[in-house]
Image (cartoon, grey):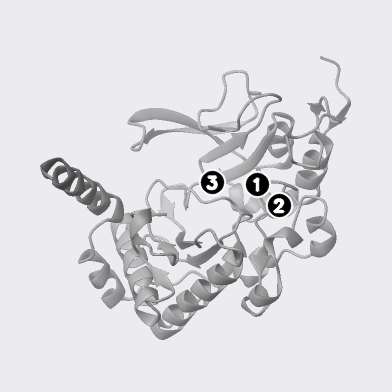
Amino acid sequence: MAADETRDGVELTNLDQPLFDGADATKRDLVDYLDAVSDRIVPVLRDRPLSVVRVRPGQAPFMQKNLPKYAPEWVRSVSMWAEASRRQVTYALCDDRRTLLWFANQRAVEYHPALFAGEHATHLVLDLDPPEHDDSFSLAVRGALLVRQALDDLGLAGAVKTSGAKGVHVFVPVVPGTAMDDLAAATRALAARAERLDPALATTAFIREDREGKVFLDSTRAGGATVVAAYSPRIRPGVPVSFPLAWSELGSVSPRDFTVRTAPGLLKDADPWAGQMPAPQRLPDDLVEEGHTIPVARVQAMHEGKRRARARRAE
């Protein structure tokens, strides 16, 4: 297939095709956007096992974890055991502009890096998922401010970004050597503390039917989980991107403000994600200890689901 153009040695094809149904954007828009922000998105992908969500013409989007065998030899990779799928996976490492452009040409729209680099966990993350509502994002913002208050009470600080959908992500960088089980415990405890600040607004209930229309404080993004990267596009109408914000900006924006077409102009030469990210912090002992007393959400939900199923059968 003849290339439409070549950048950094990467042949780019079919650039004027629609990106996906409802995108109101072409493959060229995706490539141009990722190229424009490559010096900002590559640092948040570098050295991290990467999963991407691709979309091919006429097909549903799909998540790709294993690096395809046809990938160029210069795309770095790492082979790891994936606990969720119980198999060995060869993940790509997107360490440079050339690799990012190659992924863009593969129609990789979303970029979901691991929350560790090398052997070290790097961030505690809470994913705030609001209920379906006309005012979903403002509810997520209110939930994020609860998390910020809980962090302030602990002497910790975090950075915030839109998810690129209707939610918000809070990232708290942690010092190297933080044990994965302690990080997961601290994430559960932070979510619980934020919930206690306003239980009418926020919940840590993992089972959707138990959330009662509240903002879900998802504390499961630890261990082998991924979170969509800052600056990553999303497969949503208009192709919004996950956009970093100052805490003071949260209440005055909409996720629809930030798309592959608008974000470069809003960013100009700035890198707000790097600029607003605090220095790595040590997790307080009392937070970790509290978290170890809180059941793992997925395990608890599994047991509760089985209990409810037994109860229904007994009726």
Q: Measure how far apart labels 1 and 3 are at the Cα level.
A: 14 Å
Of badges 2 and 3, the one in the foreground is 2
* Quarter of the picture holding the N terminus: top right
**Residue at horizontal 23%, vertical 71%?**
289
Q: Residues within 10 Å of mark 1 (few under 14, many from 20)?
A: many
First in residue order: circle 2 vs circle 1: 1
Q: Amino acid at mark 2?
A: Pro
Residue 69 occupies quadrant: top right
- On residue 113, the disc is 3
Query: Mark 2 sits on what residue?
Result: 240
* Mark 1, secondary structure of its residue: loop
User: Which residue shows up at 51% across the image and 28% down it?
Assistant: 66
Quadrant location, the C terminus = top left
Sequence-first disc among 1 and 3: 3
Where on the picture, by quarter, is residue 272?
Answer: bottom right
| Lower position in the chain sequence, tag 2 or tag 3 | 3
Residue positioned 42% across, 79% down in the render: 150
Which residue occupies the foreground of this view, 243 or 315? 315
The residue pinned by badge 1 equals: 234
Q: Is residue 24 above or below residue 54?
A: below
- Badge 3 local density, few (<14 within 10 Å), some, or many (20+)? many
In the image, what residue type sits under mark 3? Pro
Give the alpha-carbon distance from disc 2 to disc 1, as whole Å. Answer: 6 Å
